[in-house]
Image: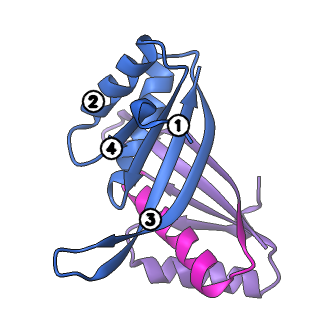
Chain colours: A blue, B purple
Amino acid sequence: MAGVENTVFVGKKATMNYVLAVVTQMNQGSNDVTIKARGKAISRAVDVAEIVKNKFVTEAKIDDIKIATEEISTEEGNLLKVSAIEIILKK
Amino acid sequence: MAGVENTVFVGKKATMNYVLAVVTQMNQGSNDVTIKARGKAISRAVDVAEIVKNKFVTEAKIDDIKIATEEISTEEGNLLKVSAIEIILKK
């Protein structure tokens, strides 16, 4: 598992924000970056990985992809299950 | 690559429709089923794989996950790039 400093959490912002974050980490010397997302942001995380790989860091490859189910607690104290993805990009 | 008969394409319907389709194929003798999706349906495909694995076919495991960029042509004749995912479930 990569350290937090090599991880980009994808949420609701525009895709290019996260692309820039990943590219910046790779240009600052990280050879691998983990892209994480939950729920509906999973599709965006896949977009981010594909855009970085195809347009910005063409020597990067998908090293591993994991999916899982995570439990998050809502403000009302309920447990909610959401799917999660982890995409490891390596150059 | 699995044959079309072992493939479930995840689209805009409710998640449980696709869960049922995957479970049915596994109960009819398929040892592996490929779950495919594009664009925003990618998150739902991950949900489908997780629900099948955790609730219905607990001996099933994620065998492989691939992501890619596909080109689709719009009705106006333009080429549009979309991310795609393929999740292979095996029991």
Q: Residue at x 80, y 76 (%)?
A: B30
The residue singled out by tag 3 in the image is A83
Residue A41 place in picture, x, y as percent: 33, 52
The spot of residue A26 in percent (x, y) is 45, 18
Q: Residues within 10 Å of mark 1 (few under 14, many from 20)?
A: few
The magenta segment is B39-62
Q: Are marks 3 and 1 on the same chain?
A: yes
Residue at 69% over, 81% down: B58
Q: Residue B87 occupies which quadrant of the picture? A: bottom right
Provide the residue designation for mark 1: A2
- Inspect the image, locate mark 4, and give the three-letter code of the amino acid beneath it: Val
Tag 4 residue: A10
| Image depth: mark 4 or mark 1 in front | 1
The answer to if B56 sits in the magenta stretch is: yes
Q: Is residue A89 above or below residue B29?
A: above
Looking at the rendered image, the disc whose residue lies closer to the viewer, 1 or 2, is: 1
Tell me the tag on residue B78.
none
Asked whether the residues under marks 4 and 3 belong to the same chain, the reply is yes
Query: As displayed, is residue A16 above or below residue B33?
Result: above
The residue wearing badge 2 is A16
Query: Upstream in the sequence, badge 2 or badge 4?
Result: 4
Gap between marks 2 and 4, in whole Å?
11 Å
What amino acid type is highlighted by mark number 1?
Ala
Distance, label 4 to label 3, CA atoms, is 13 Å
Quadrant (top left/top right/bottom left/bottom right) for the C terminus of chain B: bottom right
Reading the chain from its start, which is encountered first: label 1 or label 2? 1
The rendered magenta stretch, by its main secondary structure, is classed as: helix
Q: Position of residue A31 (x, y in %)?
A: 55, 20
Q: Residue sitting at 31 percent across and 33 percent down?
A: A18
**Foreground: B80 or B90?**
B90
| Lateral position of residue B2 relative to residue A65, left or right | right
